[in-house]
Amino acid sequence: MTTALIVIDVQHSFTQRPTFETDGLPAYLAAQNRLIEGFEAAGLPIVRVFHVQPDATGADPFSLESGHVRPLEGLRDFKADLTVHKTRHSALVGSGLDVWLTQRGIRQLVISGIRTEQCCETTTRHASDLGWDVIYVPEATLTFTMQHPDGSPLTPAQLRARTAAVLDGRFARIMDAEGALLAVTQEEAAIA
């Protein structure tokens, strides 16, 4: 086993923010759940990452005390090989994830989760810079409308396309869920 699926910040916390949008949610969950199902079927490790913020009052939906740091409704139930909490954009900063991956000989990561241009992209760049081969699956990432500095909207589709363009060939291979699963199973079979 040299490949791990990283499921980043797929948590209920986002539903508590005014920026949460459900338009792309069903398609995202279908792709995310397909990756999880494929990794389970292949017996490959899956890592769950939760973003947490310190806030003893529980007012921040990303604080453990809020009760919102739990899997997003609609996410396939799975047994994570590792669950980590992060407080930074990259899942590799301060979470111990890098050590766990290295100790297990994981050489390739498949990145998925929430938000496309934020934690997923940042983790991809960081992982690549640290030497991991990365497959980035845009359809298995979710994000929400943002605004350009001039106030015009930047849609989730535009954010996914932009992120794929800047990562492709430099930091990751860009694939859809089926392509990623096919590549991973073929690569794992070649190693076995």
Image (spheres, rainbow, N blue to C red):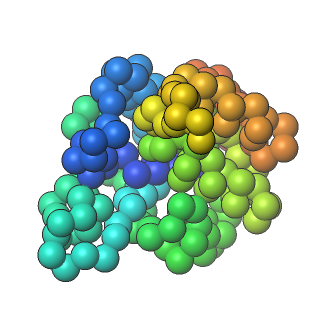
What x and y, as percent, mark residue 140? 50, 32
Q: Nearer the viewer, residue 110 or 192?
A: 110
Residue in the image at 46% along x and 50% along y: 8
Q: Is residue 60 left or right of residue 110?
A: left
Q: Nearer the viewer, residue 50 or 76?
A: 50
Q: Is residue 60 left or right of residue 140?
A: left
Residue in the image at 71% along x and 54% along y: 125
Q: Is residue 104 visible?
A: no
Q: Which quarter of the picture shows residue 148?
A: top right
Residue in the image at 20% along x and 56% along y: 68
Q: Nearer the viewer, residue 181 or 119?
A: 119
Q: Which quarter of the picture shows residue 111?
A: top right
What x and y, as percent, mark residue 178? 58, 21
Q: Is residue 167 visible?
A: yes
Q: Name the outermost residue toward the front.
A: 150
Q: Name the outermost residue toward the right.
A: 169
37 to 117, vertically: above or below:
above
Quadrant containing the C terminus in the rendered view? top right
What x and y, as percent, mark residue 134? 71, 46
131 to 109, vertically: above or below:
below
Q: Which quarter of the picture shows residue 165?
A: top right
Q: How many marks?
A: 0
Residue in the image at 79% along x and 61% along y: 129
What x and y, as percent, mark residue 191? 75, 45
